[in-house]
Image (cartoon, rainbow, N blue to C red):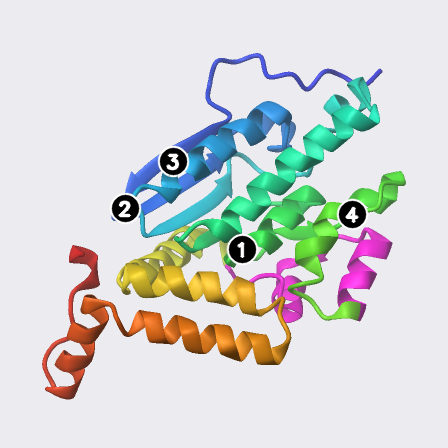
Amino acid sequence: MPPSTADTTNEPLVLRSDKDNVATLTLNRPAHFNTLSTPLMLELKAHLDAIADDKSVRVVVVTGAGKAFCAGHDLQEMRDDPSEPAMRALFNLCNENMLKIIQLPQPVIAKVQGVAAAAGCQLVAQCDLAIAANHAKFGASGINIGLFCSTPTVPITRNLGRKQAMELLLTGDLISAEKAQALGLINRAVPAEDLDQAVAELAAKIAGKSPHGIAIGKELFYTQIEEGIGAAYERAAEMISCNMQSTETQDAIDAFLDKKPLPNWSDR
């Protein structure tokens, strides 16, 4: 029997810290490579639910404690009760977290400081943006133990080309951050010592934009991408028409036309 992966400390499994309108959520099971146990996913969902209604938060960063970003699901937990009801409950909870990332009005950036495998790779793919240390590795590794990465398939196939996604899913190979960037899984890879600064700069840039514009833009992005082109254009026209009704947008356009300084969105 493999060693237990039960958490024996009283520390939170997800840490939250806020600074400059950016909420950072840190997966905090470093001894277990931040695997997604049920307790961890429940804490993550509670944080995401709270952030959704927190007007002070403009951007969310998700990262991991220790050497790994996230090594996937907790296999010991899965083996302890592999019944179909238990597995459905586990993966439905995971799905809720992934969908919540989409539904948040704030953009979510994955800050990948180490390996992101299986459901960890899924989490990276599901975040709106991702920056990784150049030593980080990525993979849909479940197939190596006979477990096809079914739920990671959903965001991976929405980020990568079909053949590139299929190769990742069928081989279980870990790929470099450089290749992950080339395939479109992450935005960019940077030296490890530059990771914090690169993520902070991207978060600050987004946090300085119109929160209303960002929120409706993110909603449109994920909705239209699943629709036919006609419906997508119709939805886009409706969205930008509603966007134009915003006082803050009208003020910004007036300032632009009058060659005056644009509003300081961070004050709104």
Q: Residue at x 68, y 43 (%)?
A: 119
- CA distance for labels 1 and 2: 27 Å
Across and down, in percent, residue 248 comes to 19, 67
Q: Is residue 1 above or below residue 145?
A: above
Specify which label sits upstream in the sequence, 3 or 2.
3
Q: Is residue 113 visible?
A: no
Q: Are marks 1 and 4 in contact (CB under 8 Å)?
A: no
**Mark 1 vs mark 4: in front:** 4
In the rendered image, the residue lying farthest to the right is 146
244 on left or right of 1: left
Q: Residues within 10 Å of mark 2 (few under 14, many from 20)?
A: few
User: In this picture, which residue range is highlighted in magenta?
Assistant: 163-190
Q: Which residue is mark 1?
A: 132
**Mark 3 vs mark 1: in front:** 3
Give the quarter of the image for residue 202.
bottom left
- CA distance for labels 2 and 4: 35 Å
> Which labelled disc corresponds to residue 55?
2
**Mark 1 vs mark 2: in front:** 2
> Which labelled disc corresponds to residue 50?
3
Across and down, in percent, residue 208 comes to 26, 62
Q: Is residue 45 above or below residue 156?
A: above
Specify which label sits upstream in the sequence, 3 or 1.
3
- CA distance for labels 3 and 2: 10 Å
